[in-house]
Image (cartoon, rainbow, N blue to C red):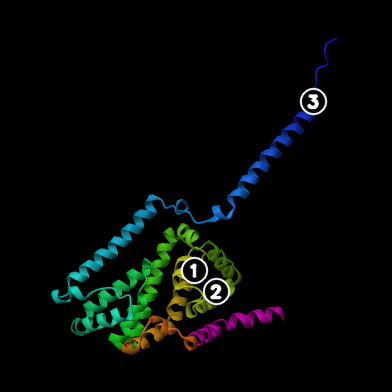
Amino acid sequence: MAAPRNFIGEPERRLMRDEENNAADRDNTKDNDEDDSPAAKKPKFDKLRLNSFEVGAVVGVFLVFLIGLFCIYLTMPANHYGNINLPRTVSDLRLLKDNLSTYARNHPAQFILGYCSTYIFMQTFMIPGTIFLSLLAGALFGVVRGILLVVFNATAGASSCFFLSKLIGRPLISWLWPEKLRFFQAEIAKRRDKLLNYMLFLRITPTLPNLFINLASPIVDIPFHIFFFATLIGLIPASYIAVRAGLALGDLKSVKDLYDFKTLAVLFLIGFVSIVPTLLKRKRVYE
């Protein structure tokens, strides 16, 4: 007699298919867990991807600024060409101030145009060194005009960086500061009802770097008008400190001397005042 043939019905076939699918899912889960290993979490250059339009837009904006600065540079008298450089130390800044004081006095409009263009360019493209330009404003223009100049340029440069980040910022900031971005997004979500007060606190105090705030704000959906007014008002205390220090440039040894414990305590006190309405509202809610 022939051996009996095994007969598998439809329920058994369905059960076998389910087991195979579950096994495949387990394999995929294992692969994903391996991708979450510390080595896989490290930033990789291939994660920073921009399309051709984004790259073209950034290069175009950069070239417009660069051409504008070059044209301003050509309007300067020939004897000042060799005196222009971006300072990196307080000693460099003192030398630059001595070289430019006569030019700023004799050609104020041209100097201010070049100063503003340079400041906004550096802020837009996240080039470090604007603190030296703030000190220079105090050294050359005094407290009142210096503060007006610094606050205007810092706000304009931050706004320009805001819109540039709106175009290309998400892959950049996700690559550079993924954890900080998640933290910032969670904090913003909790404070939507008093967002201006929170942004003022961040601008006044050194809780988060201004560079990060400029880049991250459009990514976490902070409205531009709140970003603008928080920047305009919140940068006044720090600008005042830098401009006042520029008046006594000869006594300044390092930019680190600008923010001693007393100065930081004052900034945090002013920042705390800016969030008092938020704290009071939260207290009333819990009561």
Q: Residues within 10 Å of mark 2 (few under 14, many from 20)?
A: many
Foreground residue, 258 or 211?
258
Instruction: Determine which quarter of the picture holds residue 128.
Output: bottom left
Task: Kindly state the secondary structure of the residue where label 2 is placed.
Answer: helix
Q: Quadrant of the N terminus?
A: top right
Q: In the figure, is residue 110 to the left or right of 174?
A: left
Q: Earlier in the sequence, mark 2 or mark 1?
A: 2
Q: Is residue 5 visible?
A: yes
Residue drawn 59% across and 73% down? 193
Q: Earlier in the sequence, mark 3 or mark 1?
A: 3
Foreground residue, 58 or 212?
212
Mark 2–mark 3 CB contact (< 8 Å): no
Task: Kindly state the secondary structure of the residue where label 3 is placed.
Answer: loop
Q: Quadrant of the C terminus?
A: bottom right
Kindly give the residue lying farthest to the top in the view shown: 1
Q: CA distance from mark 2 to mark 3?
A: 64 Å
